[in-house]
Amino acid sequence: MAILSEKTGLSKEDMRKLRSLRPGMSLDVQVKSPTAAKRVRTEFVGMDGTRCLILRYPDESKWGSLKDAIYADNSIIVRFILEDETGEVIAFKSRVLLVATRPTHIVFISFPVAIQNQGLRAEKRTTTRTPVQLATIDTGKPFLRAMILDISSKGCRVGVKKEQTGSLKLVGKQLMLKIAGGAEIEHSIKGKVVNHKTDDVSNFYGIQFVEGDNDPDQLNQLLAEISIEF
């Protein structure tokens, strides 16, 4: 993966990005064994201030034995996707401090001293907290209450409390976003759910607006209202 921007030292913005890590977030981990580099996936567990980060030990039933790659003092590269207004892949190099096996299998790594980032979106998104109802395409009947967390002319990211969604599967489905506008106007935007992430409290869905099926003037008005309000 090409890294487009590299920083030496951690700025306040870099710290904000690192602190955006939440328990359960998916991580891409690259480690070296005596024979080859291995790239596996695991999840973030937590951090202890700026002393260390804690990762779940990757599932060896899925990725194979990692004892020759994840051990104290070995280097490790961690990547994760920051789903905010910019949409970035954040990467940093670290060092394994400790591998604990009890009471659960976790890995302690050193806090990074620098990060690298690669933008994913051509268009910057506006951060917001705008209530939205997700409705079916066929009937227009709302079935979920959600919150728009960021938005652009191409799509948005919404958050939904887990108790609302249950086992509902939305990725790949088209739906209608109903958003209250000014002067008692309701904006209806057609979108397709393209990705899903989760944390302990909420489900997060990336929604791509369906090109050609939405009124550009209505979308621009919605974006203008959100930009003014927030």
Image (cartoon, grey):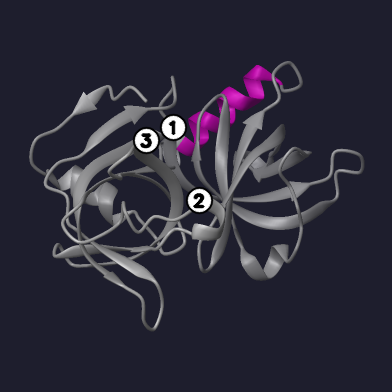
At x 79% / y 47%, what residue is drawn? 135
Q: Are marks 2 and 3 in contact (CB under 8 Å)?
A: no
Determine which residue is flagged by label 2.
63
> Which element carries disc 1, helix, strand or loop?
loop
CA separation in Å, label 1 and label 3: 15 Å
Q: What is the number of the mark on residue 125?
A: 1
Nearest to the eye among marks 2 and 3: give it.
2
Which residue has dot 3 on it? 89
Near-viewer residue (96 or 114)? 96
Magenta segment, principal secondary structure? Answer: helix
Q: Nearer the viewer, residue 52 or 84?
A: 52
User: In front here: 130 or 112?
Assistant: 112
Q: CA distance from mark 2 to mark 3?
A: 22 Å
Q: Earlier in the sequence, mark 2 or mark 1?
A: 2
Amino acid type at image mark 1:
Arg
Amino acid type indicated by mark 2:
Trp
Residue drawn at x 38%, y 41% is 38
